[in-house]
Image (cartoon, rainbow, N blue to C red):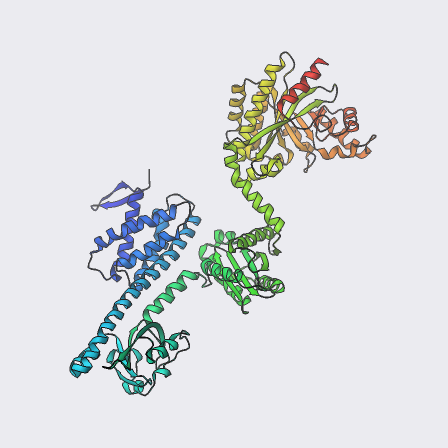
Amino acid sequence: MGPLRFRRRGAYGVTAEPDGPEDRLRRFATIWSRSVFPVTSTSLTRSELEEQLLPLARRLRGALLERAFDADTGKAVGAALVDAHCTDPEALSRSLDCVDAYLVLYCGEDGPQEDLRARAARLQHAMAAGYAQALRERTLAEQEAIAQAALRAQGVVAQALHASEARFRAVFEGAAIGIGIADLEGNVLQVNGALLRMFGGSEQSLRDRKVQDLTHPEDAPQTWKLYDELVRGEREHYHTEKAFSRPDGTALWTNLTVSLLRDADGAPQYSLALMEDTTERRLLNLRLRYEATHDALTGLPNRTLFFERLEKALGAGAGQRFGLCYLDLDGFKTINDSLGHAAGDRLLVEVADRLQSCATAPGEMVARLGGDEFVALTTGPDTRREVDDLAARIMNAMIAPVRIDGRELTVRGSIGIVEGPAGGRSAAEVLRSADITMYRAKSAGGNRFELADPEADARAITRHGLTTALPAALDRGEFFIEYQPLVHLGDGSVRGAEALVRWLHPQHGVLGPDRFIPLAEHTGLIVPLGRWVLEESVRQAGEWRERGGDTDPLRINVNLSPCQLTHPGLVQDTVDILERAGVAPEALCLEVTESALIGADDDLLKPLRRLAEMGVDIALDDFGTGYSNLANLRRLPVSVLKLDRSFTQGMQQFPADPVDLKIVEGIVSLAHSLNLAVTVEGVETGAQAEQLRILGCDTAQGWYYARPGPPDRLHELALVDATG
């Protein structure tokens, strides 16, 4: 059931009505229509405008919630605003404000707010781009209509010149567009009132100038070539966009159509210029372009403009190179959480100003990608040294504290640097490499910069690929278990096995747990994966028991990760699995690493104690690798100590290192005095096995006995022991 929104009824109470997605969508459309209605030139009522905006709001909600972002939807909505006669610049500004403030609030469902707000910002940029494109197309259509009218007016003017000066003067002076007539030498003969108002000068000041004097620094190269062709009679007319300089120094932008007027014999005689003032429209387009390509908070170029510049740099000719610095602030989230987002925004503005001062050389730019992520780009023939200097300048600029609300905040950042020749990689690949390198700098302690390393990039990409493939791999049954025997050191019999999970990856082959267990723990998948390993291992122990007959059942050892220890369903899952497989709790041993239990409180130990009370053995794995607190053993519900393989390394030869022997002897003596069994890992030679037997260790595992393998091989080893 969605949230309840209260509406007022009478003077004494309120009633609650359900507010579903459609209701929230209509509320958003209502707010939108109320915002833009006062600045919209339309004969519709406000309610009718709301009905026009409702399907546009629905499209925005769809684009906000779609898995893949579609900029075309935002562009289409921007274009639809123009079709709805919302052509006043203020209508676009208010529409973007509504999307920024209310789209995620009313249409965001329960998704991640930061991601939704980032997508809403991208929708705003797309809407602005679509609005500008539609407005431009509408303008071009209007210009074409004017041009056609101008051509028709050309005939009218020519007839008026021959038929009646009065009729010509009426057309000439009454036209809403600027009209000027000049001879073929460029002397201005006549101008109408509309053209005088556009230029802002007197008629004489214009007639004193020649057409060839009306140049402007931003004239297109072909502008005067077209004019020369026209006065020579080689073309009848041309259309172009041209700027003129007004007397006050400002620029007048026009859509200019110039036509050739011929005499009765068809010889060129005059040039007729028709001008439409497009200055305000051009300024609006420039403003929309700026807003679409610049960050609203800092004023820096945004992701869109940065990618344009980066793609241009990567597409430069041979001999050109690029250097990119990808900056992420260290600890910015802490500032936002402790001081508020307003303080965080002020910090970002200060950082942006400092970065801007670092990239002032030709070919350098700074942009904000979003959040606290910035990029600096340098281009040229030799960027190897320049990009290092740029990164050093950025780090130096961050040294001075930023003072906000009476507090001095220390600003630090991590930078990933990518440098190389143009044309080698795409913009997305370059940015991904810089992102990976930046996180490598952050992992190394932050407040530093690192250079991109292709091998490190490949490892990070592979790690990311494995992370994303993990959930589907469990569903597809790509995991399997191998078993390594646990051998009694006294009589050499097989007492059980440790279950070791493997991943049969479609591309990378068989992967050991060191490649994917940390990823599973990071993503939380370790809980369902660990439950599957426990279920499969216990089921296998049940099969061994049925095939073994009267022999002692083989015990199965299964590893538990720290995440599984804190999962509330651990005890119940274990009980259910044992009951379904018909396996006694005494046949199961759960291995927990020593580091996971260092400083463990009673809440963490409670599920282990319940399992131990049921009869499940608890083994303290990798004992001796952490800061072992021997006195802590008495409060832990463990029945087995598993010595790490580092204790057996000094026993490769016989006799072994006496120091190692004393350490192991002391641990074994302490363990036995506490009624704990001792298992040793990593036994690879007979000398090691003999030394450990003499020291009193109970069981061992390692390649000396057998490598991890399929369950049938372990059963065969157990049968050999049973038959002698």
Answer whether residue 175 is visible to the viewer in this image: no
Q: Residue at x 27, y 55 (%)?
A: 33
Q: How many marks?
A: 0
Q: Nearer the viewer, residue 567 or 524?
A: 524
Quadrant, the C terminus:
top right
Residue 198: which quarter of the image?
bottom left
- Residue 578, compared with residue 176, is above or below; it is above
Q: In the figure, 623 relative to 421: above or below?
A: above
Q: Give how far across and how far down residue 385 sits, in percent.
A: 63, 64
- Residue at 50% in and 52% down: 333
Image quadrant in which you'd find residue 666:
top right
- Residue drawn at x 58%, y 46% as measured from the top left: 460
Q: Which of 591/612 is in front? A: 591
From the top left corner, tell me how far across and down residue 142 is, in percent: 27, 66
Query: Which of the image's four quarters has the N terminus?
Result: top left
Extreme residue in the top direction? 550
Taking the spot 65% from the left edge, 30% from the top edge, the residue there is: 620
Q: Is residue 182 at least partly visible in the picture? A: yes
**Residue 597, how many percent across, how many down?**
61, 34
Q: What residue occupies the far front of the structure in this picture?
A: 265
627 left or right of 85 in image? right
In the rendered image, residue 251, in percent from the top left (x then y), is placed at 36, 76
